[in-house]
Amino acid sequence: MIVGKSLYPIGTSFSSVLNMQDRMENLQVQLSTGKKAHSLSELGNDRNFDMTIRSRQSRIEAFQSNISMVNLRLDFLSNSMERLDEIEADSRGTVASGGIGSQGSNMITTKTLASARLDEVMVLLNSEINGRYLFGGSFSDTPPVASFSEIMDGEGGRDGFKTVVNERKLADAGVDGKGRLVNSTLPASTSSIFGGGVDGSELLNDAEIGFADGETFSLSGGGFAPVNIAFTNVGGATTGALLDIGVADVNAFVAEINSQAGATIAAVENGEIVITANDLTNSIVTGGTATTGLADVDARLDTVSLSEDGAHPFGYKLSTLSSSSGAVSLTSPAGDPAALSVQFTANPSSDETISIGLTLPDGENHIIEFKAVNGVPANAGEFQIGIDENATAANFSQAISDELSRISTIELEASSTYAAADNFFNAQGDDVLRVDGPPFDSATSYKNATSSDTVFWYTGEDTSNARQSVVGRIDETTKVNYGVQANETGFVDLVRALSALSVEDYPSGDTSANDRFSEMASKQLTRLAESNNTKAGSIELISLELGIAKSSLGSAKERHTNYSVQLTNMLAEIEEAPIEEVAMELLSLQTRLQASYQTMSAVSQLTLVNFIK
């Protein structure tokens, strides 16, 4: 009889062996792949941690990608900023050394260099990487700055900078080229007609014949006392102009302007008062009757006035008035338009001065100093002391006129060029302005330029905080601002300075060329001075701010790298199979399986017959 194998635990042994085989297969896979499982479900409770860690790693990878992109853009910006700073330094050095150079060589080369540098600046401000323009704020798909030729010469019927400069020079110089200031010599405030039996109330202001606008007189007094005639701007009247002084029911007297100072008065018709325009103290009265008794006219041209020709932004603006002499009475600039006056109460002493302060179109101040001298003046700004205060006033008035003509070809022209640059190359929040004309030499206001009549040099984004116009997120709660706009102060100052030098010519026959070049160079040094480096929006401060952004990127990148290592280690603990343990377990399973196979093989051979044997 055969004893059945059911008497032995064969089924249980087979089940155990199968489990060990399955385990061995898993261990073999783990040994070959290094992974604990093929799917998240095989990780058991660890799968939630695994998914959370992987999500965080994905975000870190995205931040690292942003950091790499922003880093690349900042590298390009840094290179451009370094070159712009070099151009600024080179431009400053060109005008700081050597003056006008041998035979005016610096005047020629400076313009050429300024044009080349301005062209390079425009190229740098249009820097782009992978189709993204870096100096237009968030407007990154089109060039933010026009080309050099468009800006200087205009394009498509739109005016460029050269045209705008010429218009501004005309507006600042005025019709007479003296900076929109009016200079005149005035009589004393009142002149007296001494009467002998004439009631002043009978004097009438009948007419003005041949007088320019503003040249008037008025009457005061009365009875048998002297009757005062107050003149206003008589000094500007033309030769032969007539001023009727009528007497009620009596003969009329006529004041006639004669332009020859101190000349012998020729015989005139009865009833005429002949007033010599430049020296009213020599005026006489001819004619008259016993009834009227007019005896003398006491009028003096002892006061010099200077006034702006209107309330507008062009030309010189009067700012201050001072004197080292006690022989003058000063009326400081006041009003809008402003006016000042200098009355000579006596003759000043030699070397005493009168100073007039002017504000130039570009906002800078200029002082004109006039010095009283004996004899014919030898230098600009000097005026001759006359035989009396009236003659001295006339000489002073002429000195003002001459000096305004002289400095208008130097200081005013240079200032007009820079003022035009300030309005054409608009900074953050500014409009592009140009003179409202024609006519330009008598213009009284600006007008806003439009894209149809003027080339706009900058067309990028215009925000007050350029850095915030472009933002890169580099962490959950951290972002860097690295936007840059070409219309920020540092770039605009550089562009304005170079453009001003680029449009100025210094012809060999121009006697003012050397002085004008020196004035332009002086303004260039002021505008590009190192002291401006601390101004908001300067090239140096922008570079510093971008450097801080780059430093933040470096810190974030290092932080992400360290965090990523930690997360990777955590994932390894969850997902990675410990190779040494797997190998040891495989060896253990192998031994156990071999023992199990041998045992099962032996058991499978057992029968009662064999046992009985």
Image (cartoon, rainbow, N blue to C red):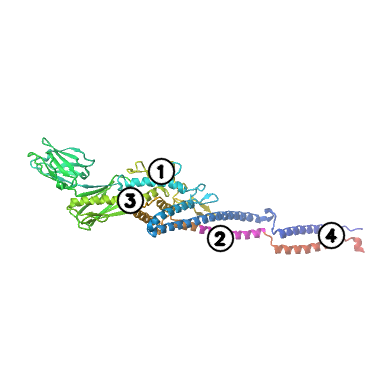
Q: Which residue is mark 2?
A: 558
Kind of element beneath mark 4: loop
Foreground mark, 3 or 4, reads 3
Give me the C-alpha separation between circle 1 and circle 3: 27 Å
Give me the C-alpha separation between circle 4 and circle 1: 107 Å
Image position of 189 with respect to 606: above or below: above
Q: Which residue is mark 3?
A: 409
Q: Which residue is mark 1?
A: 449
Q: Which residue is mark 4?
A: 8
Among the two numbered marks 1 and 3 on one chain, the one whose residue lies closer to the N terminus: 3
Q: Residue at x 67, y 54 (%)?
A: 40
Kindly indicate whether the residue at mark 1 contacts the one at mark 4 (C-beta within 8 angstroms). Answer: no
Give the extent of the magenta segment.
550-575
Kindly indicate whether the residue at mark 2 contacts the one at mark 3 (C-beta within 8 angstroms). Answer: no
Kind of element beneath mark 2: helix
* Residue neighbourhood size for the residue with mark 1, other residues' Cα within 10 Å, grouped as few (<14), some (14–19), many (≥20): some
Measured as percent of width and height from the top left, residue 582 is found at 72, 62
Give me the C-alpha separation between circle 2 and circle 4: 66 Å
* Residue neighbourhood size for the residue with mark 2, other residues' Cα within 10 Å, grouped as few (<14), some (14–19), many (≥20): few
Give me the C-alpha separation between circle 2 and circle 1: 50 Å
The amino acid sitting under disc 2 is: Glu
* Left or right for 435, reference 77: left
